[in-house]
């Protein structure tokens, strides 16, 4: 009888356990080699690169809980936090902080999970839309109001997908003088963004907003109008959204349950004051950086030697 058999005989009679040899390759595995996995366990798939295919809901009654959501399509530093705080004071409108829902993605850990959803007629893009809709609807239900307003600046980059996800969505385009946007974007983080970098980086958002305006139907409002005559600007938005005008929108600090959140929109002292502050003076046309001239022309702001007429639609 070998030593191992003698040991197992004694160990088995005393404890009911026996010693077994470790399978080759399990112990002392070479560094860098693939780890062993439990029998029958499929390793999770790596997320696939690229955005998934998407489409409008096949059955909106079953696939969507959120009805007629409102999306503020605006560049960074354009006053979107001010606008959402004011709209949140309305009895029918809930405008939370930036939700960044477009960054919520669905990935299949197994092929069976993907196959199961395919059998239901759903792809990865459909599953993501269901997730987005549930998140936003949950936020709206918690508020007890009727319509949700979302203002994340990055939404401009996926405006076509948002329109496909919610075919009944409504869009408000918020514009501001491009040079004022770039300057404010630099001042928000001067160490990270030089004035030149701020111009080019903020221009990405402005161009995305302009593409959205070309593709979607909506209502356009300007930051300068919002600060100079907020009552008229807000009355126009209320008329577009088919909700009654409510004067308390002008004193958003007194009728607001949504505090600014650092990193999810503007949270500085000016926005926390609870009242509309005067905007900064517009730059002289000759002071507008050259890369901003085309978008200034598209939005009706004078720049360089040219003065463009305002676009109002």
Image: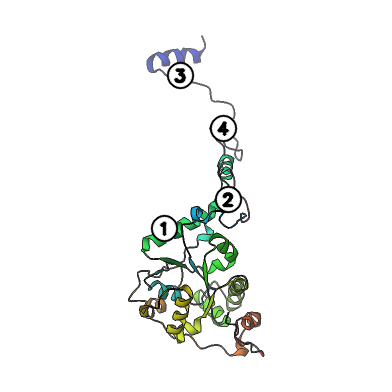
**Residue 91 location, quadrant:** bottom left
Q: Nearer the viewer, mark 1 or mark 4?
A: 1
Q: Where does the magenta region start and end?
A: 36-50
Is residue 105 something one can see in this rendering? no
- Residue 209's spot in the image, x, y percent? 58, 73
- For the residue labelled by badge 3, is the local secondary structure a helix, a strand or a loop? loop
Mark 2 or 4, nearer chain start: 4
Based on the picture, tell me whether residue 128 belongs to the magenta stretch: no
Q: Is residue 192 visible?
A: yes
Label 1 element class: helix
| CB-based contact (under 8 Å), mark 4 and mark 3 | no
Dot 4 or dot 3: first in sequence order is: 3
Point out which mark residue 124 bears: 2
Q: How far from the left and from the top, in percent, is residue 287?
A: 60, 88
Q: Quadrant of residue 145?
A: bottom left
Identify the residue position indicated by label 1 in the image.
Answer: 138
Residue position marked by numbered label 4 in the rendering: 28
Q: CA distance from mark 2 to mark 3?
A: 48 Å
Residue occupying the point 53% across, 61% down? 166
Nearer to me, 133 or 47: 133
Seen from the viewer's position, the closer of residues 271 and 214 is 214
Q: Could you tell me how far apart the alpha carbons at marks 1 and 4 are, in whole angstroms? A: 50 Å
* Residue neighbourhood size for the residue with mark 2, other residues' Cα within 10 Å, grouped as few (<14), some (14–19), many (≥20): some
Q: Residue at x 46, y 15 (%)?
A: 8
Percent across and percent down for residue 20 are 50, 21
- Residue at mark 3: 18
Which is in the foreground here, disc 2 or disc 3? Answer: 2
Asked whether 11 or 169 is in front, the reply is 169
Foreground mark, 3 or 1, reads 1
């Amino acid at each position: 009888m070998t030593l191992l058999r003698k040991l197992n005989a004694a160990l088995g009679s005393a404890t009911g356990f026996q010693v077994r040899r470790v399978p080759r390759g399990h112990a002392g595995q070479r560094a860098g080699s693939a780890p062993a996995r439990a029998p029958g366990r499929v390793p999770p798939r790596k997320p696939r690169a690229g955005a998934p295919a998407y489409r409008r809901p096949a059955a909106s009654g079953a696939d969507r809980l959120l009805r007629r959501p409102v999306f503020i399509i605006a560049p960074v530093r354009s006053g979107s936090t001010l606008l959402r705080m004011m709209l949140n004071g309305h009895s029918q409108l809930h405008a939370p902080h930036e939700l960044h829902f477009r960054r919520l993605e669905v990935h299949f850990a197994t092929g069976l999970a993907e196959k199961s959803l395919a059998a239901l007629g759903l792809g990865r893009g459909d599953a993501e839309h269901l997730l987005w809709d549930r998140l936003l609807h949950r936020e709206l239900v918690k508020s007890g109001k009727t319509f949700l307003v979302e203002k994340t600046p990055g939404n401009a980059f996926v405006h076509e997908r948002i329109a496909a996800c919610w075919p009944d969505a409504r869009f408000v385009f918020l514009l501001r003088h491009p040079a004022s946007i770039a300057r404010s974007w630099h001042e928000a983080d001067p160490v990270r963004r030089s004035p030149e970098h701020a111009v080019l980086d903020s221009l990405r958002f402005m161009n995305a907003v302009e593409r959205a305006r070309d593709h979607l139907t909506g209502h356009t409002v300007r930051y300068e109008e919002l600060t100079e005559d907020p009552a008229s600007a807000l009355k126009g938005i209320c008329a577009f959204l088919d909700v009654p005008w409510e004067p308390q929108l002008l004193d958003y600090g007194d009728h607001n349950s949504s505090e600014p959140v650092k990193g999810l929109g503007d949270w500085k002292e000016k926005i926390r004051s609870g009242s509309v502050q005067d905007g900064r003076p517009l730059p002289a046309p000759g002071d507008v950086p050259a890369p901003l001239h085309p978008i200034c022309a598209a939005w009706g702001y004078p720049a360089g030697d040219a003065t463009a007429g305002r676009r109002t639609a």
